Structure formats: C-alpha cells, structure tokens
Amino acid sequence: MDNGHGTQNGSAVASCDVTPVPESDISEICQRYGNDRHRMMDILLDVQDRYRCIAPSTMDKIAARMDMTRIEVEGVASFYSFFSLTPKGRITIRLCDDIVDRYHGLEAVTQAFEEVLGISIGQTSADGVFSLEYTPCIGMCDQAPAAMVNEVVITRLTPDKARAFAEGLKAGRTPEQLVTGRFLELTPYERANRMVDNNIRHAGEVLLGPVPEDAGLSKAAAMTPSQIITAVEDSGLRGCGGAGFTTGRKWRFAAAERSERHYVFCNADEGEPGTFKDRVLLTERPHLVFEGMTIAARAVGARDGVIYLRGEYVYLKPLLEQVLEDRRRKGLLGKEILGRKGFDFDIRIQMGAGAYICGEEGALISSCEGLPGEPKTRPPYTVVRGYLGYPTVVNNVETYCHAARILDRGATWFNAMGVEGSHGTKLYSICGDCLNPGIYELPYGHTVWDILDMAGGKDAAAVLVGGPSGAMIARDSFHRQLTFDDLSTGGAIIIFSGERNILEIVEYYLSFFVHESCGYCTPCRVGNVFLQKAIAKFREGLANPEDIEYLKDLSSTIIETSRCGLGMTSPNPVLSTLQNFPLVYSAMTKPSRDGLRDTFDIQSAIDGARKIAKRRSYIFDRDFTQ
C-alpha cells in the first residue's frame, strides 16, 4: 500500500497487523498527549517510531480512543511521507534525491547501498531490518549527496563511504556509533555538528556575527506591546521566508484582534529544495530564535508558542529541547518572564513528518491541529483566525532572529543596511556547481555576479534564485540585484554550470511538485502532471512549436486557479526557463503535421495523472457535505 507520498514497500514483510499493537500501548501513547486529537501528529510519530508502521488495526484503536473516525486517522497517516501503512525496516535509510545530489554522484552512492544491503530502492529486507528509499531535499544541498539514517544525518557521501556505512550497519553497529563511538557522550550541539557541517562562509553583522545573549528580550520586557511593534515596523523588516510581508504590520494585525488567546508559531519547515539557512540558525542561534518568538508573544499578547520543525531536521530536536529547558530555568520562558508580572509564554516543538506543503502557513497550522497538511482558505488570514480559530502569528526562523536583534540594536541600525525596500541582511543558502557552497549573510542589494564571485561559481550558465518556486535566470541577468523588488528569494541560490541539462532540471522540479502537492486542487494535482509530461515530450524531441504555447497556457491556468502558494508557483520552472532560455525549447521542437497538434485524450491523461500523483481518491473525492 502506498502512503501517499512515499515509495511502495517491495519486501516480503506485508502487513503491520501480524503482531497487533496492544490496546494498552495505544492508550499510553494517547494519554501522553492528553488524548487531544490536535496532537495526532505526535501520536502517529510515536506509533511509527515504536512499531515501524501505522497498521489498520492500530488506526482503529487510535480512532476509538480519540473519539474519531478511522478515515480521519488514516487521512493524516496517509498524507505524510514519514508515516507508513506498511512495515519499514528497523533502520530506514532515506537517500536525498534532490537534483543537486543527483549531479554530485547519488546514482553511484545508491548502487553501493543496494549492493551491500541486498535490496533496491523502495524495498525492505526480508528480515525487516533495513529499508532503503529516496526522499526529496533534506536541507543538505551544500554537502551532497546526503542521507537520513533513522534520526542520524550523513553527508558528503561517496560510493566508498556509503559502502562502509552500510557494512557497519550490517555488522550490528548503530547509525550513531558509525558517526562516532562517543556519540552518547557528546552534547546535543556537539552531536549536531559532528553530523552536519554548518558551512558558514560569510558571517554578517546581524545574525552570524557576535550576538549578545537576550539583549533584545531584556529591552522588549520594559516596552509596551505597541512600542515593540513600532520598532519592528520602523526597521523595515520583512518576512524572510519568501513572501516578504512586512513583519511589524503582521504583528499589529494580530495584536488588534480581540480574542481570549493568541498564538506565536515559528515556521522551521524549510522544505524548498536548495534552502538550508534555517538549519544553520537552529544550530548556531537557537536562543536567538526563541528570543524573537518571545518578543513577538509580548507584542501580540500570546501565552503559547509552537515551533514546527521539519521531520528532516529531527536530529536537531534534542538540541532545541535542551535550549528550551535552559531558557525555562533562567526565567526566559514560562511564568513572569524576566520578573514581569503577566508576561507568561512557553514554546513546544511540533515535529513534521515529511510534507513540503507544510511550509505554507495554513498547511502548517492544519498539521499542528492534527489534520492532513492542507492549506486553509483565505481570507480569513491566520492573524485573524489561525490555530484552533485564534489569531496566530506565523514567521520563519530567520525573521524571528532579526526581530530580536532589532529590539537590541534599534530600528535605525537595521534600516540603514541593505537598500530601499529591502533592509537589513539576508542569509543565502548557496549550492550546486560552485567551489564554496554554504551560508552567506549579506546586506540586500548584492548582484548575482557578486554571489558567484564569492561562492566560486564563475562558470555558471544558469542560477536558480529562490528554489524551484523562484526563477531560473541566464548569464544576461546576472547583473540583477537580490532584493524584494528585483530578484526575491527566501534564501536558496542554486548554481548550474553549462554541463547541466536545463530541461532535465525543469522536469525534476515538476516531479517534485507533483510529489508534494497536497492534492486538494485539481489544477495543481493534475495540471502539474500534464506539465511534467509536456516537458518530457520536449526532452524526447517530440514537441511541436505549438507545445510552447500549451506550456504557457497550462501554467497560467494552474497559477490562476490553485488555492495556495504551491500551485501558484509550481509552473515557475517552466515559465522562467521559457523566458530566459527560449533557445533550449525551440531547439527541441519539430514542425507540426499539417500545422495540427497531436490529439489529446483528457480523460486518459487525468487517469494517468492520478496514478502519478499518488493520491488516494477517497481523501479528495469523498462527500464533504455530511
């Protein structure tokens, strides 16, 4: 059975129900989360971790315990790629299948794992010990190829390194022991750094240079909520996740809502391929992240906060939990923060489970509510009606860090950096065909040529700015500036040399969007499959000149009729390459027969699209009126 996002289980292990999960175990897991249906993600994560799958009978028991229907539980269990309805191995190896990993030797690394483990991608060994599968970008593009082995991350894989790691696993060593024999003796911070290199290439003045501890929070505690918001507004800070909405305005809108509760959420689900800046901040500046959230809570009157941590960053969870506990001990979280009566705020970690769509704030909130990660209809916006129907501020990791520094150093200091309309500094995740991949903190206004010079990417023929939902530009656009008003990016910059096939890159990113669509909207669910098929036609040299107009028209339809940002940006790899690399497309076309396009069977295409999109029809086609 397919889990909606992941691969088929090709092993002899066929059912989780061979040994049913005891009722008492389900009861204990549900009680751990207060029998709260909104904590369904945590419940299912615990079940998956303990039993390696979420069996039909287990779902029945969870549903009965939580006073839910089986279809409600299965709707969540089947949505996220890290949940499985069939057994996974005790050790699950997820190889990152991003295009950057492919170009850095993923195929040979995969072959080494397959040879040693005796299984192919998508299979589990007959003894139930190993599963081997591909997964989309895990945020390690600066050190590709990379993989997750349970909750351990391994990077810079070569065939020899992969073979040695697999042999160590087969010999009975744990993934942690293969990282270092002293793994359990290390602090959470040391463990994270032993697994992953942060690759900080340029530390700027705001975030990655010297940062005094909680200086911004100390000043905010002595200010009124309105004064805090005014400082953030005057700084010119805009959201750093890609949309660029003015942060201070968002906070003011939330604060103005009369409600018994307000919430502050941190979006740490950076799933955009090529992006890894938040990974570095969560490792090197976790206190600053939580400081910023606490300042936002004082500004809008929130008592509860949630940081939504992508499942691929589970290796950072122990570090973040340690930091949260440290802040509670110091009086920086909890009751009467810094001795201020009525200043109460605390934060919990909500783990994701492998769904790119949950980077969209509505889908993120749905996930935190124990639902499939489907975007919410807007308006109302989350600052009006968010988590559980209450006003909710959602900002990303980098934004909260900037807010904390602004409260420390002042709005004028921050506003003076960058250029008009794009103030402060920006973290850029640079990877691909360059000598110095990694993190660069720079003021807004640098050109793409500047970036290429710093990163050692002088041979670039194409640069993807903003990840696949951004724009692919050619050399004649490298003079453009990285600003909100010119080339806007949430942080990802992927460099491609002239050796790379533009259409191969486009087809890969379309397959990514097909895989990650939540499936709610037909234009997104089906239209992106049509786009992928059309690009494949160009790659095979079978396209007609009229197919170029077909790509434009279909892209426009998907953008105009999709419900959320995924569908609205998924055609961008097609549209930006049509605009900036037109000769690539024209070189792969042939004249039409009698000026007519080939006939097109829409129903057949839709049926095929549904299969490719891997969506279970009952989730999206059932009657919602009951």
Image: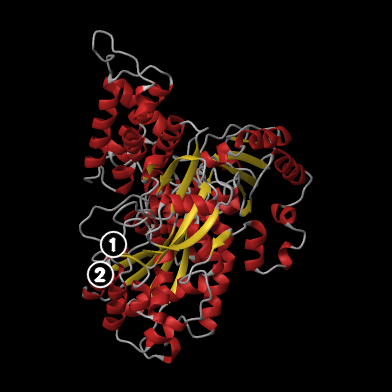
Number of other residues with Cα within 10 Å of mark 2, as a class: few under 14, some 14 to 19, many 20 or more? some
Residue 584's label in the rendered image is none
Q: Estimate the x, y position of residue 570 in percent, counting from the top left.
A: 34, 41
Q: Residue at x 28, y 53 (%)?
A: 376
- Does dot 1 land on a helix, a strand or a loop? loop
Q: Is residue 384 left or right of residue 92?
A: left
Colour scheme employed for the rendering of this structure: secondary structure
Circles 2 and 1 in contact, beta carbons < 8 Å: yes
Q: Is residue 106 left or right of residue 364?
A: right
Give the labeled residue for mark 1: 245
Q: Position of residue 379 (x, y in %)?
A: 20, 57
Badge 1 local density, few (<14 within 10 Å), some, or many (20+)? some
Residue 318: image location, x then y, percent: 59, 66
Q: Residue at the location (40% across, 86% down)? A: 219
* Residue at far right of view: 171
**As drawn, 402 above or below 527:** below
Q: Which residue is mark 2?
A: 249
**Which residue is at the front of the view, 61 or 144?**
144
Q: CA distance from mark 2 to mark 1?
A: 8 Å
**Label 2 SS:** helix
Amino acid of disc 2: Arg
